Image (tube, helix red, strand yellow):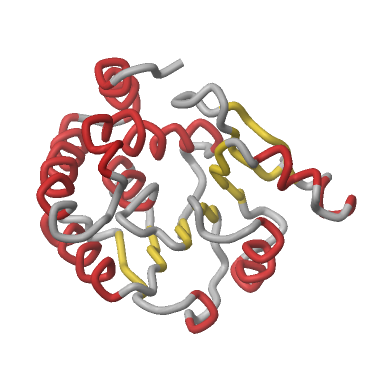
Amino acid sequence: MITDEASARQFVDTLADAAAVDRLVHLVSALKVENQKQNLISRGSVEEIWQRHIADSAQLLRFVPRETPGPWLDLGTGAGFPGLVIAAILPENEMVLVESRARRVEWLECMCEEMELTNCRVEGRRLELVKPFKASVISARAFAPLPKLLSLSAPFSTSRTIYLLPKGRSAAQELRELPAKSRKLFHVEQSLTNPEAGIIVSAK
């Protein structure tokens, strides 16, 4: 279990090479500055960025085989979690970040440029307005209730798409509330960064 900033950094180091770590260090530094201008993350999590945001995002790679081709679609990416983190660690994989709020779109585009994430593009619009494509992975962190999320993302999903949906304490409850036919397609995995949090993952 990842319990503090030190263990979070150690965990990320097992997944990322030196260049990726440098990109993530820059992201953390820039985020602390930008968060004073706009509320990208809660103030209470600023001193726990590596645990609450970087490692929390990076842990999703546990469920994605390295040979999985792109593109990876991140819905409602907000400050860039998990999208920017995954793009930094996997610079050869195509990453598409969907975010409709203008100031956050500006932030994401700035970070893609500063972190030299040529594999990452930002769709600054509502998901309904994004031209559908076949996503290998779909992630979403606090994007929408599960039924709405699955409905909106359906045009991008195939039978092989991996869903990775951090849902905090509500994971098991949201999954139970799905119709039985849909419910059997997913299961809940334990988060490594919060003992009370779960991640809804597509059953493969």
Query: Is residue 204 shown above or below 157?
Result: above
Residue 202 sits in quarter:
top right
Image quarter of the C terminus: top right
Query: Is residue 90 shown above or below 18?
Result: below
Residue 11: where, in percent of width, then height? 34, 21
Q: Left or right: where does residue 126 sit relative to residue 138?
A: left
Q: Residue 145 or 184: which is nearer the viewer?
A: 145
Residue 189 sits in quarter:
top right
Give me the residue at 10% from left, 49% from top: 33
Q: Left or right: where does residue 167 sit relative to residue 183?
A: left
Give me the residue at 50% from left, 53% from top: 142
Q: Residue 165 or 120: which is nearer the viewer?
A: 165
* Image label count: 0
Residue 9: where, in percent of width, then height? 26, 23
Residue 111: where, in percent of width, then height? 18, 58
Q: Left or right: where does residue 176 sit relative to residue 69?
A: right
User: Which residue lies most toward the right here?
Assistant: 180
Q: Left or right: where does residue 22 sit relative to residue 165?
A: left
Residue 27: where, in percent of width, then height? 18, 45
Query: Is residue 19 shown above or below 135?
Result: above
Residue 13 sits in quarter:
top left
Give me the residue at 28% from left, 18% from top: 10
Give me the residue at 54% from left, 80% from top: 128
Query: Is residue 138 shown above or below 52?
Result: below
Q: Residue 48 or 57: which is nearer the viewer?
A: 48
